[in-house]
Image (spheres, rainbow, N blue to C red):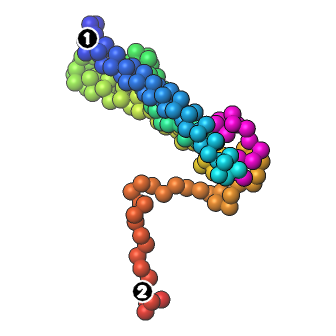
C-alpha cells in the first residue's frame, strides 16, 4: 500500500509545530528566570518579609514553577506522541476493523477499501488521537501548579493563606457582576 506524501508532510508539520512549542516553552522559561531574579531583587528592597528565609535560587524555582507556560510543554508532548504512535494506531484500527468485519460474516460491501472501512479507519484514528490528547490534558490538570502566593508561603514554611480553595476567575467572567438584589423582594 502506497502512503501519500501528504501524510509525511502532515506528520513533519505536526512535529515542527511540536518543536516550536518546545522552543516557546524553553524561551519563556529562560525569560522567567531573568524576571524572577529581578523580582527577588525588588522584593528584598521593598518587601523583605515576602522573601524571608528564601535565597535567590529558591525564589527563582518557585517563581518559574508557578508562572511557566506548562500548556506548551503538554501540547508539544501530546502532538509528538500522536504523530509517533500513528502507525501503531492505524494498525490497531485496521486489526479491530478486521475482527468486527469477520464477526459480522465478512460482507463484501464492507470489505477493506470500501466506504465503511474508510469511515472506521478515519474515525477510529481520530478517536485514538483524542484519547492521547485526553491523557495529556488529564496529566496537565492533575499536575497544575498552585498560585504563586501559596507556593511562596509554602517555600517560607508558613501556613497557606486562608483562600486555600483558590480558584482564578475565568477571563470571560472578570467583568461579570451579580444582579443587584431588590430590597423590596427580600
Q: Nearer the viewer, residue 110 or 72?
A: 72
Residue shown at 44%/29% (left/top)?
A: 24
Question: Can residue 129 be seen by looking at this rendering?
Answer: yes
Residue 30 on the magenta span: no
93 vs 32: above or below: above
Specify the segment rendered in magenta. 49-61
Q: Secondary structure at mark 1?
A: helix
Residue shown at 25%/11% (left/top)?
A: 5
Label disc, if present, on residue 5 of the rendered structure: 1
Residue 121's spot in the image, x, y percent?
Answer: 32, 23
Q: Nearer the viewer, residue 70 or 57?
A: 57
- Mark 2 closeness class: few <14, some 14–19, many ≥20 residues within 10 Å: few
Residue 136's spot in the image, x, y percent?
Answer: 50, 33
178 vs 147: above or below: below
From the image, tell me which residue sits under label 2. 182
> Could you tell me how far apart the alpha carbons at marks 2 and 1 are, in whole angstroms?
66 Å
Q: Is residue 90 left or right of residue 157?
A: left
Q: Is residue 181 left or right of residue 110?
A: right
Amino acid at each position: 500500500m502506497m502512503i501519500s506524501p501528504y501524510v509525511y508532510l502532515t506528520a513533519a508539520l505536526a512535529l515542527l509545530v511540536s518543536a516550536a512549542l518546545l522552543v516557546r516553552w524553553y524561551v519563556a522559561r529562560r525569560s522567567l528566570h531573568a524576571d524572577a531574579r529581578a523580582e527577588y531583587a525588588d522584593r528584598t528592597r521593598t518587601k523583605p518579609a515576602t522573601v524571608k528565609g528564601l535565597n535567590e535560587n529558591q525564589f527563582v524555582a518557585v517563581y518559574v514553577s508557578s508562572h511557566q507556560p506548562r500548556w506548551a510543554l503538554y501540547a508539544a508532548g501530546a502532538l509528538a506522541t500522536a504523530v509517533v504512535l500513528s502507525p501503531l494506531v492505524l494498525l490497531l484500527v485496521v486489526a479491530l476493523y478486521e475482527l468486527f468485519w469477520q464477526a459480522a460474516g465478512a460482507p463484501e460491501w464492507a470489505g477493506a477499501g470500501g466506504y465503511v472501512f474508510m469511515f472506521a479507519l478515519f474515525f477510529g484514528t481520530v478517536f485514538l488521537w483524542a484519547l492521547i490528547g485526553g491523557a495529556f490534558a488529564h496529566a496537565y490538570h492533575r499536575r497544575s501548579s498552585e498560585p504563586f502566593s501559596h507556593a511562596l508561603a509554602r517555600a517560607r514554611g508558613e501556613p497557606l493563606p486562608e483562600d486555600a480553595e483558590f480558584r482564578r476567575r475565568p477571563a470571560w467572567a472578570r467583568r461579570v457582576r451579580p444582579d443587584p438584589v431588590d430590597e423590596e423582594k427580600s
